[in-house]
């Protein structure tokens, strides 16, 4: 079936997503290599995006990065999210109780998008930032949300090749399926160093929607002892359940 997407609009969005995903500014040649767009079309689109401040460039116009107006759109999304104020209060209370960094994220297709983070008293090589987007299979957040789906839905959603961030990332579909079944049984996800060396995370889905689109997680040192880990899991479950009850009571969907 022929796509209904307008080519120029699709290319503009892909350019912005490519720039947003890059830790460094990209040259026109690098951007062309990553997008596959013709150089003439790419040059015209970049000129327009720079003029509109969606993209910014250096003085020589040799490298490009996300511009300030991209932030306006992202901020507007957060400002209009009815669940987020309640989630922020939950993150504050959870962080105050356990002392570790906590996150609130939403599934975006085969990825998770971080909507809020509260830094722990001590950071453990975590890279927390709003707007960070990671493959769902890499994170406890993503595994908690993938477990809300059926086996067939997960298979259709994820790519054939699962990227590995560390030697511990679950890149085998069969092993991931077994892990998701455990998540469904116990009600929470736990990954150790699958996304970040030295860090383990526990996550619980915020199922005020069915299937759940949001989840809360806690990042902690990978060598945290079992007794302390159990306390963290208990706290994440309790605070998440309280948030679920609040969102349902407020009629937020």
Image: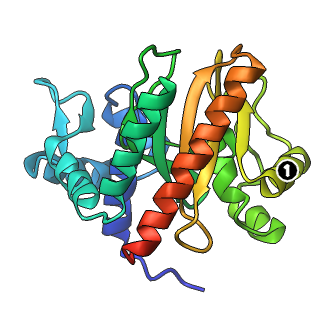
Q: Quadrant of the N terminus?
A: bottom right
Residue 139 visible in rendering:
no
Q: Position of residue 155 (x, y in %)?
A: 79, 63
In the image, residue 219 above or below residue 43: above
Query: Is label 1 in a helix, a strand or a loop?
Result: helix
Where residue 165 sits, quadrant-wise, is top right
> Where residue 129 appears, x then y in whole percent?
38, 34
Q: What residue is drawn where x is 52% and y is 47%? A: 239
User: Label 1 neighbourhood size at 10 Å, few (<14), some (14-19), many (20+)?
Assistant: some
Which residue corresponds to the image point at 10% horizontal and 52% vertical from the top-left? Answer: 52
Image quadrant occupied by the C terminus = bottom left
Q: Nearer the viewer, residue 14 or 250?
A: 250
Q: Is residue 82 left or right of residue 120?
A: left
Residue 84 sits in quarter: bottom left
Residue 247 in sight = yes
Relative horizontal placement of residue 55, taking residue 13 as reference (left or right): left
In the rendered image, the vertical position of residue 91 relative to residue 80, given as above or below: above
Question: Which residue does the numbered mark 1 point to in the structure image?
Answer: 182
Question: Where residue 117 sits: x, y (%)?
Answer: 39, 37
Q: Residue at x 47, y 30 (%)?
A: 97
């Amino acid at each position: 079936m022929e796509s209904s997407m307008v080519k120029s609009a699709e290319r503009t969005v892909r350019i912005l997503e490519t720039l947003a995903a890059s830790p460094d500014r990209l040259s026109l040649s690098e951007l062309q290599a990553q997008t596959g767009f013709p150089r003439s079309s790419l040059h015209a689109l970049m000129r327009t995006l720079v003029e509109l401040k969606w993209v910014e460039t250096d003085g020589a116009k040799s490298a490009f990065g996300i511009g300030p107006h991209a932030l306006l759109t992202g901020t507007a999304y957060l400002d209009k999210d009815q669940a987020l104020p309640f989630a922020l209060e939950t993150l504050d209370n959870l962080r105050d109780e356990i002392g570790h960094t906590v996150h609130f994220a939403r599934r975006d297709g085969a990825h998770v998008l971080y909507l809020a983070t509260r830094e722990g008293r001590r950071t453990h090589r975590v890279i927390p930032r709003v707007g960070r987007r990671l493959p769902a299979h890499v994170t406890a957040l993503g595994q908690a949300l993938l477990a809300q789906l059926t086996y067939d839905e997960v298979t259709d959603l994820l790519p054939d090749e699962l990227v590995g961030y560390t030697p511990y990332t679950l890149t085998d579909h069969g092993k991931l399926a077994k892990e998701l079944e455990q998540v469904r049984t116990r009600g929470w996800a736990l990954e150790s160093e699958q996304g970040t060396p030295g860090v383990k995370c526990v996550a619980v889905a915020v199922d005020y929607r069915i299937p759940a689109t949001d989840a809360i997680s806690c990042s902690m040192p990978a060598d945290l002892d079992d007794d302390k880990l159990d306390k963290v899991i208990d706290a994440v479950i309790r605070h998440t359940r309280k948030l679920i009850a609040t969102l349902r009571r407020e009629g937020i969907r």
